[in-house]
Structure formats: structure tokens, C-alpha cells
Image: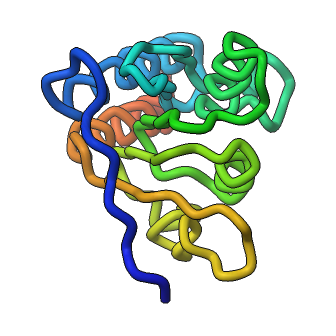
Amino acid sequence: MNTPMEFPALPGQWESWEQVMRRALEQARRAAERGEVPVGAVVLGPDGSILAEAANAPISQNDPSAHAEMRAMRLAADKLDNYRLNDCIVVVTLEPCLMCLGAFIHARIAGLVFGAHDPKTGAVTSRMDGANLDFVNHHFPVLDGILADECGQTLRDFFRARRKKPADS
């Protein structure tokens, strides 16, 4: 296992990572309102500006790759006119999956901040040490557990509501 990388300093005008995560949680709540799994993401530029924000949308877009972090990275890359997101930090409410991990590596992100761990499919810390794979050419530091309880509760509330069956008349 590789030694942990130092996480970049909180960029720009932000007072805390929790403040940024609250922006991602706003996106997660918007996803839930549309019937999507409530995951939200924010991409911060090197100066701390928000380059992009997005919510999960695979159902509404009929696109299995329309995860919040993928959508936010696409928007950020478009804004930068570059598929590389060098010096950018991705903030997401749920530990990313293997697909999103691959995109982070190819985009060369500077760091990842996430809220709730995903013990089933989390590819960054839960199921594997995805940010430090020895066979890839880009590694990035990870800051996890930011507002984890709130991020996790948002997901639990969503799935609990979906499992409720309408009362028999």
C-alpha cells in the first residue's frame, strides 16, 4: 500500500469542507425530488470557485454513467475546455463507484472529498484503495467522512420512502 498523500488546503473563500459538502447535499436533495438516488457533487477549481455542481440523473437521462460526479466533471471539463481537471477537487456525498474512480484517474483530479462510505460498491476506501492503485499513473488524496451522517441519512430516508408500500384501501 502506498503512503497517504497530503490533502490540498481548503481553496478560496470556503470556511470548511463541511460548507462545500452542504452544496453537494443540496444537489443530492434535488436528485431525490426527481426520484433519483440522492447523490450530489461539486467540482472546485484551483481558486476554490465552483466550476460545476450536479445531481444523480441516470434514470431521467437513461444513462448509466450519469452519476453526480460524472455529470459535474463533464460540466467542469466543458467550462475549462479541457478533459483534464488538474488542480480541481471533487466533492461528493457518497463514496464513488469504480466507474467514477476511473474517471477521476483519467481526469487527473487533485483530490476527492466524500461524505458517506458505500460498503457495497465504494471503490475508494470501502471495497478497495482506489486512489492509490499501483497499476495506474495518477494517484490523488482523499478526505472522507465529511458530514457522513447527514449524507448517509439522506440516502437512508430516500430508500426507506421508496420501500414504503401504499396502504390498502
Residue 151 visible, this orientation: yes
Q: Is residue 51 above or below residue 156?
A: above
Number of callouts in the render? 0
Asked which quadrant contains residue 147, the reply is top left
Q: Is residue 68 left or right of residue 155?
A: right
Q: Position of residue 108 (x, y in %)?
A: 65, 47
Name the foreground residue: 167 vs 50: 50
Q: Residue at x 78, y 31 (%)?
A: 83
Asked which quadrant contains residue 63, the reply is top right
Q: Is residue 76 above or below residue 115?
A: above
Q: Is residue 60 above or below residue 157?
A: above
Colour treatment of the image: rainbow
Q: Residue at x 25, y 44 (%)?
A: 146
Q: Position of residue 90 (x, y in %)?
A: 49, 36
Residue 167 visible, this orientation: no
Q: Position of residue 45 (x, y in %)?
A: 48, 23
Asked which quadrant contains residue 22, the reply is top left
Q: Is residue 80 left or right of residue 150?
A: right
Q: Is residue 126 left or right of residue 143?
A: right
Q: Residue at x 21, y 23 (%)?
A: 19
Q: Is residue 56 above or below residue 159?
A: above
Name the foreground residue: 34 vs 74: 74
Q: Residue at x 62, y 23 (%)?
A: 72
Name the foreground residue: 9 vs 147: 9
What is the residue that sits farthest to the right in this orientation?
62
What is the residue that sits farthest to the bottom in this orientation?
1
What is the residue that sits farthest to the left in this orientation?
15
Name the foreground residue: 145 vs 35: 145
